[in-house]
Image (spheres, grey):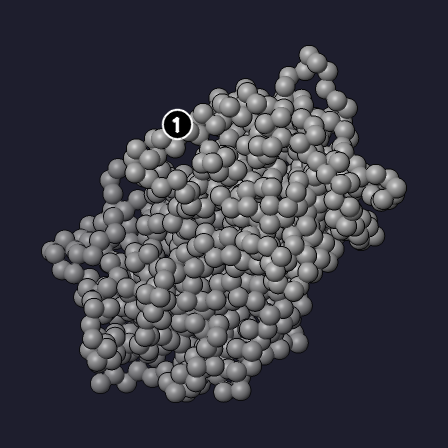
C-alpha cells in the first residue's frame, strides 16, 4: 500500500457547471446563451437533447447541497450562468436580480451546510446577445469590458462569502471546440458542412487571446477592489491530458509530446506564468497567434493565485512529417489511443476521447508544477464516464466499480505527486456531483457519482421539449425610450431582434405619444359607435371606391366566419387621384368623417393621432432595420413622402349580443401595425409555433406591435409575422374597443426581398429549425413577379375583403376573383378536398391592412 498522503485540510469536493445542471432556461428573466442556441441546431447534440431541464438544479439546488453533505464534500465548484445574471450580457445591460439571487441562495445554502463554495465565472455559456451583438470572444474591445463587468458584479454580490474564484473553465474547449472544430457552441469551423461561419486558422487563437486578456483584467479588478477585504483567491482552470510518445524511441515523437502539451496547456498557462506564448506555437502559427501588448502582458502575467487543473486521460502522440495545416491546433501531430505496438492507453469508456491512465495524472501535474514554479494547484475536475452506462439497469449503474476504481487510482497518483514530487496541490473536485447534460454527448454519457433519474426523458415523453421551450409564452414589452438614448439603444436593439426572430408580436411603452392623446382617441373612438345608425351609414365604405369608411357589424369575414365587429376605416389625409393615375391610386382619398355636430373633437383627435403614429411607425421600422443588421434607412424606399397610413376604430360587441369570433385568426399584411386597446378586456391573442394562444392583455400606455407579412417578405422571412385573433368579450362584460394603426407602404413600390445579413438569416433559420420548421408558411402576396406594383396587390385584396364595395366600384376585378375562385373550387371538389382552409395564414392571400383576407374564399363559395 502506498504511503502517500494528502494534507489534512485538503479541499475535497465535487464540480458541476451551470448549463449542465440548472435547466430553467427561460425562468425569472434568464437570457439566452450560445448553448441554448447551439442545442437547437439539429445534429449538434448526440441525442438531440439540451440543458433545458438537466438536473433541474435551478429549482432543486437545496437537494444538490443536501447530496453534497451526504457525500461528505468539503467544497462545491459550480459555475454562473452569465445570461441568468445579465440576460443581455453587456456592461450597459441590466442585471437580472432574480437570477443573481439564485446564486446568492445557493451560496448561502452551501455556507449554512459548511460547504466551501468555489465559483467558476465562465463555463462556456456565453450570453447569446453578446455573440449576436459583436461576435463574443472575437471582439476584444467589447468583450473584455463586458466580461470584467460581469466578474465585478459577481465579486460584489458574493465576494464576502466566496473565497475561490475561477475566471474561466477550460478555454481550450471554448476556443478549439467552439471556433476550430465547431463541435461546441457557437460552432464556428472551416468545415462548411458543419457551419456557414468560421475560420479555424485564425479565430481560435484570437478568441484565446481575448479570453486571456479578459482573465487578466478580471483578476486585476478582483485584486484591486475585492481581495483585500474579501481575502479570496483567483485563478483560471485549464484542461490538459497526459501524453506518451507513440514510439518512445523516436525523438520526434518525444518532442511532439512536449509540443502537444504546449499547444493545449502552455498556450494559456505560459502567458499567465511566463508572460508570452510558447515558442513552439509562435513558430508554427506565426502572426495568426496574436501578440500581447505591454499592458496586456502586465495584466496577464502573474494573474493566477492558483492553477485550476482539469484532467481526465492520456493519449499517444505521433509526430507528423508534413508541414502543419493552417487548421492544425495540436502542434502538427497525431493523437492516438494505441501506441506502436497496439497497446491501448487505457480502458474504453463511453467518451471516445477518454481512456483512463492514472500514472499520466501524476506525470502531468508534475510537469505543470515544474514548468510554472510550483504553483498552488487545485484539481478542479477529474472523473470518467463508463462504457454503456446509459443502457444498464439502475442497479447495475449503482454498482459503480469502474468509476470507483478510476477515482482510487487517480487520487493515489495525485497523492504520490504531492508526497513524492513536491507538487503543491490543495484540493480535488470530482467531476461530477451527478449525471448531467454532457454537452455534445447529451445525456447518453454519464459522469456523475450520483445517478440521475433522467428528468429530461420524462419531459420529452410528455411532448416535444424542443418545441415547448422555443415557442414563446409571453409577449415581450419593449421600452421605446431606450431606443432614443445611445447608451441604452444597443440593448434595446438586441431585445427587439430577439422579439422579431422569435415572437413577431410585442408591446412598446414610452412610445412618445402622450397618455392624453391615447385617452382622447379612445374616448372619441368609442363615442363614434353611439352615433345614430343613419349617420354611420351615411359614411359607409361602399359609398366610395377608396375603401375608407364605416363597415357594419358582421360585414367582414376572417377564416370563413363573420367577424363580430363593426368599424370605421380612416387614413392619413390624401386628395382624390387624377383621372390619369393608375387604378390603385383610388385607395388614396379623403376620409369620410362623421358630422362635426355630433363629434366636434373627433376629426382633429384622429388626424393628430395618425400624424404622430406615422412618425412612431417610421421610427420603429428604422429600428427594426437596425435590429436585423440593416442600415436604419433600409426601408425608406418603400415609403412615399406623404405615405398613406391606415387606422381602424373597432367595436367588438360582447358575446351575448351575437355569435362567434371578434376577429378570426389572421396575420396583418403590411410592415407593422400598432394596436391601441381602448378598454380593459382581454381577448387579443397571438399564436405561438405550438399552436397555443398567448394572451396580450391591455397594458395602459402601450401599443401592441404586430409584424406584418410585408415585413416578413421584405426581410426574406427573417422577421416573423405572427397569427393573432380577438375573442369576443364574454357575455355581460360590455363591448371591447380597439384602435389599430396600420403603417402603409408605397403603392408604387415593387417588392423584392432585401439583403439581410447572413448571420441574422442564420439565427432565424436556427429558430425555425428549433421549432421543427414552420407550421404555416405564408404564400406571400409580395413575392417578386406576382404583381407589377404593390398597389395592384393591395387593391385586389381590398376587393376580396369588401365585396360590397367591389360590386359597386370594381365589378371587373371582382369578376376575375370570383372566376378564379370558382375554378379553384372545381379543382378542389374534383380532388375531393374540403373547401375549408385551416388556419388563416395557410393561404396567405391577404394583403389588406385588415384581417379579413379570407373573405375571398368565402365569396367564392357563396
Ligand atoms: O382589435 C385588436 O386588438 C386587433 C385587431 C386586429 O388584429 C386587426 O384589425 O388586424
Ligand atoms: Fe390584426
Left or right, 42 with reference to 107: left
The percent coordinates of residue 27 (x first, y second) are: 53, 66
Left or right, 68 with reference to 800: left
The percent coordinates of residue 69 (x first, y second) are: 42, 86
Task: Report the residue at 36% width, 74% height from top.
Answer: 434
Left or right, 742 with reference to 611: left
The percent coordinates of residue 285 (x first, y second) are: 41, 41
Front residue (pair 654, 520): 654
Q: Dot 1: within a 10 Å radius of its alpha carbon, few (fewer than 14), some, or many (20 or more) residues?
A: few
Task: Report the residue at 11% width, 56% height from top.
Answer: 341
Front residue (pair 231, 402): 402
Q: Is residue 639 visible?
A: no
Judging by the rendered image, the residue that carries numbered circle 1 is: 823
Left or right, 786 with reference to 789: left
Q: In what element is the residue under mark 1?
A: helix
The percent coordinates of residue 299 (x first, y second) are: 59, 57
Front residue (pair 542, 707): 542
Q: Is residue 773 visible?
A: yes
Quarter assignment of residue 96: bottom right
Amino acid at each position: 500500500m502506498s504511503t502517500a498522503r494528502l494534507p489534512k485540510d485538503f479541499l475535497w469536493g465535487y464540480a458541476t457547471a451551470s448549463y449542465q445542471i440548472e435547466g430553467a432556461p427561460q425562468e425569472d428573466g434568464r437570457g439566452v446563451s450560445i448553448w441554448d442556441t447551439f442545442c437547437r441546431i439539429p445534429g449538434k447534440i448526440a441525442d438531440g437533447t439540451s440543458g433545458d431541464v438537466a438536473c433541474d438544479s435551478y429549482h432543486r439546488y437545496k437537494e444538490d447541497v443536501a447530496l453534497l453533505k451526504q457525500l461528505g464534500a468539503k467544497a462545491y465548484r459550480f459555475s454562473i450562468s452569465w445570461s441568468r445574471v445579465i440576460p443581455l450580457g453587456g456592461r450597459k445591460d441590466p442585471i437580472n436580480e432574480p437570477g443573481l439571487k439564485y446564486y446568492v441562495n445557493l451560496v448561502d445554502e452551501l455556507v449554512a451546510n459548511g460547504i466551501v463554495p468555489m465559483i467558476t465565472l465562465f463555463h462556456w455559456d456565453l450570453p447569446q446577445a453578446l455573440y449576436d451583438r459583436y461576435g463574443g470572444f472575437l471582439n476584444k474591445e467589447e468583450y473584455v469590458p463586458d466580461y470584467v463587468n460581469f466578474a465585478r458584479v459577481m465579486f460584489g454580490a458574493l465576494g464576502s462569502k466566496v473565497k475561490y474564484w475561477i475566471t474561466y473553465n477550460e478555454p481550450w474547449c471554448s476556443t478549439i471546440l467552439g471556433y476550430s472544430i465547431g463541435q461546441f457552441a457557437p460552432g464556428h469551423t472551416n468545415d462548411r458542412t458543419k457551419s456557414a461561419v468560421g475560420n479555424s486558422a485564425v479565430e481560435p487563437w484570437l478568441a484565446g487571446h481575448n479570453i486571456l486578456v479578459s482573465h487578466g483584467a478580471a483578476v486585476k479588478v478582483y485584486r484591486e477592489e475585492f481581495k483585500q477585504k474579501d481575502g479570496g483567491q483567483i485563478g483560471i482552470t485549464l484542461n490538459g491530458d497526459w501524453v506518451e510518445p507513440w514510439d518512445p524511441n523516436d525523438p520526434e515523437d518525444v518532442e511532439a509530446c512536449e509540443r502537444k502539451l504546449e499547444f493545449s496547456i502552455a498556450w494559456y498557462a505560459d502567458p499567465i506564468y511566463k508572460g508570452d506564448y510558447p515558442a513552439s506555437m509562435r513558430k508554427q502559427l506565426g502572426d495568426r497567434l496574436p501578440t500581447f501588448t505591454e499592458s496586456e502582458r502586465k495584466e496577464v502575467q502573474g494573474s493566477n493565485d492558483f492553477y485550476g487543473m482539469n484532467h481526465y486521460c492520456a493519449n499517444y502522440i505521433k509526430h507528423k512529417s508534413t508541414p502543419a495545416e493552417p487548421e492544425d491546433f495540436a502542434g502538427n501531430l497525431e493523437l492516438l489511443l494505441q501506441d506502436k505496438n497496439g497497446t491501448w492507453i487505457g480502458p474504453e469508456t463511453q467518451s471516445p476521447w477518454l481512456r483512463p491512465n492514472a500514472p499520466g495524472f501524476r506525470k502531468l501535474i508534475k510537469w505543470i508544477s515544474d514548468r510554472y514554479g510550483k504553483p498552488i494547484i487545485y484539481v478542479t475536475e477529474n472523473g470518467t464516464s463508463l462504457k454503456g452506462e446509459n443502457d444498464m439497469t439502475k442497479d447495475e449503474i449503482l454498482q459503480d466499480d469502474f468509476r470507483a476504481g478510476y477515482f482510487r487510482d487517480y487520487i493515489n497518483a495525485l497523492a504520490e505527486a504531492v508526497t513524492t514530487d513536491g507538487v503543491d496541490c490543495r484540493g480535488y473536485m470530482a467531476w461530477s456531483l451527478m449525471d448531467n447534460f454532457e454537452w455534445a454527448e447529451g445525456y447518453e454519457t454519464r459522469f456523475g457519482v450520483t445517478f440521475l433519474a433522467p428528468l429530461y426523458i420524462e419531459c420529452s415523453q410528455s411532448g416535444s421539449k424542443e418545441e415547448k421551450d422555443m415557442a414563446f409564452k409571453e409577449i415581450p414589452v419593449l421600452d421605446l425610450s431606450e431606443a432614443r438614448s445611445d447608451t441604452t439603444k444597443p440593448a434595446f436593439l438586441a431585445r427587439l431582434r430577439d422579439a422579431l426572430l422569435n415572437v413577431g408580436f410585442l408591446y412598446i411603452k414610452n412610445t412618445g405619444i402622450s397618455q392624453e392623446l391615447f385617452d382622447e382617441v379612445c374616448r372619441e373612438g368609442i363615442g363614434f359607435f353611439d352615433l345614430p345608425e343613419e349617420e354611420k351609414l351615411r359614411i359607409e365604405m361602399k359609398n366610395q371606391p377608396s375603401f375608407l369608411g364605416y363597415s357594419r357589424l358582421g360585414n367582414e369575414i376572417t377564416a370563413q366566419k363573420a367577424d363580430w365587429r363593426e368599424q370605421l376605416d380612416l387614413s392619413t389625409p390624401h386628395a382624390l387621384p387624377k383621372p390619369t393615375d393608375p387604378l390603385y391610386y383610388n385607395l388614396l382619398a379623403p376620409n369620410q368623417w362623421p358630422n362635426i355636430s355630433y363629434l366636434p373633437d373627433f376629426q382633429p383627435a384622429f388626424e393628430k393621432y395618425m400624424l404622430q403614429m406615422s412618425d412612431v411607425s417610421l421610427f420603429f421600422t428604422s429600428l427594426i432595420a437596425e435590429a436585423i443588421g440593416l442600415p436604419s434607412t433600409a426601408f425608406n424606399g418603400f415609403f412615399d413622402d406623404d405615405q398613406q397610413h391606415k387606422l381602424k376604430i373597432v367595436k367588438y360587441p360582447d358575446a351575448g349580443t351575437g355569435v362567434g369570433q371578434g376577429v378570426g385568426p389572421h396575420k396583418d399584411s403590411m410592415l407593422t401595425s400598432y394596436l391601441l386597446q381602448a378598454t380593459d378586456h382581454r381577448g387579443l391573442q397571438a399564436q405561438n409555433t405550438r399552436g397555443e394562444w398567448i394572451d396580450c392583455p391591455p397594458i395602459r400606455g402601450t401599443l401592441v406591435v404586430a409584424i406584418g407579412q410585408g415585413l416578413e417578405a421584405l426581410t426574406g422571412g427573417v422577421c416573423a409575422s405572427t397569427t393573432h385573433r380577438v375573442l369576443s368579450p364574454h357575455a355581460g362584460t360590455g363591448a371591447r374597443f380597439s384602435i389599430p394603426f396600420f403603417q402603409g407602404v408605397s403603392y408604387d413600390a415593387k417588392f423584392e426581398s432585401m439583403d439581410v445579413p447572413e448571420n441574422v438569416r442564420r439565427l432565424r433559420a436556427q429558430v425555425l429549425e428549433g421549432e421543427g420548421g414552420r407550421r404555416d408558411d405564408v404564400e406571400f402576396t409580395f413575392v417578386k413577379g406576382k404583381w407589377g406594383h404593390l398597389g395592384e396587390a393591395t387593391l385586389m385584396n381590398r376587393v376580396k375583403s369588401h365585396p360590397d364595395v367591389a360590386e359597386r366600384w370594381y365589378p371587373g376585378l371582382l369578376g376575375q376573383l370570383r372566376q378564379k375562385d370558382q375554378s379553384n373550387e372545381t379543382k378542389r371538389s374534383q380532388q375531393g378536398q374540403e373547401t375549408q382552409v385551416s388556419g388563416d395564414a395557410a393561404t396567405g392571400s391577404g394583403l389588406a391592412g385588415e384581417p379579413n383576407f379570407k373573405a375571398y374564399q368565402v365569396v367564392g363559395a357563396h
